[in-house]
Image (cartoon, rainbow, N blue to C red):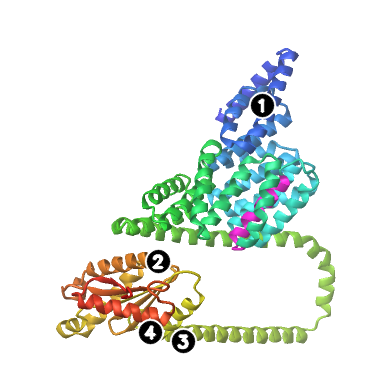
Amino acid sequence: MNFRHIKNLVLAILLAAGSAVPLHVHARDAKAAEDLFTQAGKEIKISPEKTAETLAKLEELRPSFTTVQRDRHLLLSASVLGYRGRHKERVELVRANIDQVVDPDYRVRLLYQLSAGYTQLGEYENALVAMNQGILLLPKLTNQIAKMDTLQAAITLHNSLRAYDEAHAYSERLVEIGKEDEHTSVTCVGFADQVEINLLRGERQRARSMLPDAIKICEERGATVIVQILRSLAAIDLIDSGNYLQGKGAGIQLLSEFLEVNKSSDYRTQLEEALARAFLNTGNLEQAERYGLLAYQHAKSGNAVQLMEKTAETMAGIKRAQTQFGAALEYYEAALVLKNRVLDDQLHKNLAFQRVKFDTQDKSNQLNLLEQKNKILAVERELEKKNNQNLLLAIALVAAILVLLTLWLIKTLQQKNQFKEYSQTDGLTQASNRMHFMVSANEAFKMRSGSMSIILFDMDLFKNINDSYGHATGDWVLKSVSETVKTHLRKVDLFGRLGGEEFGICMPESTQASALQLAERCRMAIAMIDTAPSGHVFALSASFGVATVDSNGLTSFESTLEAADRALYSSKAEGRNCVNVFRQVA
């Protein structure tokens, strides 16, 4: 006798024994169970962690459950497993019991749990199949929450697949359903979804304009968890937009709330990573490392690959800022491996999406195809062979022309991009050439909204290197120096080779102090370059000049460039391998 037979036998014995229990005992247990279900329904909206304790109490009353209570208990159990990140157990629980659920309202909500669980496990084709099964049941549903779970499954899954247009269409349907009964949290969830979707597809302004109303609606519905998520998204957006001070203040407060309400949420990990970046950008490396490590550890424990990649990149930046280059390199390597996993996972998602989409469309069209079959057969009999051949030839000709036009267009665009790159890039160092640097830096100065800096540096005694070791070694030095300096630059910084061994850096939105700090880091990094791979061992150094606009009477790109050049010559005069800042002599 296998385990299933033993289990069924035990259940039969329990049911038989239950028939001998007095009716007042059953009634008392049913009332207690109903009270616990009501309590759990409130808890899961406010603190999912507490719902697990209520479920444990319900487990003791399972023999007295009605059919509806059995379905509710199954749904709550799956929801709690999802909140706690135990998605494999969540899927197994639903799959083992869903066939016993007849009520369409509960069935679609369980299909949502199944779809969400499969998504977290990376089984996207199964997730899409479960989602589509739920969508097909929508016309039969009477319960708003069931409709919400069905549409939420579609939104969550399409967000994961980056099919944001489809996700947004489902969120609009969710908002419309919420208008049928404004006492439920359906409208709140729909607006929250729209805020997140707009952030995901880069429409930040639209998301920000929706946030106040979404938070107000969710607070009115008592959806504490969703309010917390919305505020987290707002805090992360503040940090992403460069508003670090306000973003840190909001984020730190929210983290303490996550610890009380939903400490295993992925939104908590996203918030920790954003706080790490905020502290990094404001120079507090100790706090940056603290939050960065928390985010990295939580992403790993939750096996959230995309979050692991993002937190690894953030930790690499923190370690680089701390000049712990070995640790920074390890995090960069980890981020690269994770990035490849994310790309593979996205490819897997896209293939699953296309396959299921095709199958769904194919099934929906089958009835129409059957109805049209007789008409199609009649038309085919009337078509002459010659006409068919001409049609095929015409299609083939059009396809060939389209292929040729496509290839020509691709080649033209590639050539255009190559010409543009060649005209802007120094062929040896892959930095901007002098003309492109000058034009871009000048434009940046014209469009500036704050302070800007120019850094010029020149390799010391470079002619001696060429004369002693040859021009090939000199070229190696220039390429190595360029690659080294690039690792210390921000994304917004411009870097160019101005001629020979002279280079320039344009730093938008930078103070004199930050420019001096960058110049000093670059000087030290150049001095640490190992020249052995060139075939010769010799020392490298460079002299730097720094000038900042709106400082010392500088107001234009030309005057700032000239001032940086004068500061560079001062560094040369002081013995080289040093940094000088331009200061106006009174």
**Dot 1 corresponds to which residue?**
36
Mark 1 → mark 3, Cα distance in angstroms: 71 Å
Mark 2 → mark 1, Cα distance in angstroms: 60 Å
Q: Is residue 196 magenta?
A: yes
The answer to whether residue 354 is above or below residue 112 is below
- Circle 4 sits in a helix, a strand or a loop, which is it? helix
Mark 4 → mark 1, Cα distance in angstroms: 73 Å
In front of the other: label 4 or label 1?
4
The reply to whether the C-beta atoms of the residues labelled 4 and 1 are less than 8 Å apart is no
How many numbered badges does the structure rendering display? 4
**472 vs 19, nearest the viewer:** 472
- Circle 2 sits in a helix, a strand or a loop, which is it? loop
The answer to whether residue 564 is above or below residue 367 is below
Mark 2 → mark 3, Cα distance in angstroms: 35 Å
Looking at the picture, how far across and down is residue 541, in whole percent?
A: 22, 73
Q: Amino acid at mark 2?
A: Thr
Q: Amino acid at mark 3?
A: Phe
**Dot 2 or dot 4, earlier in sequence:** 4
In front of the other: label 3 or label 4?
4
Q: Is residue 325 magenta?
A: no
**Dot 2 corresponds to which residue?**
511
Q: Amino acid at mark 4?
A: Arg
Label 1 crowd (10 A; few <14 / some 14-19 / many >=20): some
Q: Quadrant of the N terminus?
A: top right
**Dot 2 or dot 1, earlier in sequence:** 1
Q: Which residues are magenta?
A: 186-203
Q: Which residue is painted at 77% across and 52% down in the image?
A: 176
The reply to whether the C-beta atoms of the residues labelled 2 and 1 are less than 8 Å apart is no
Looking at the picture, how far across and down is residue 31, in whole percent?
A: 72, 21
Mark 2 → mark 4, Cα distance in angstroms: 24 Å
In front of the other: label 2 or label 4?
2
Q: Decide whether the magenta segment is chiefly helix, strand or loop.
A: helix
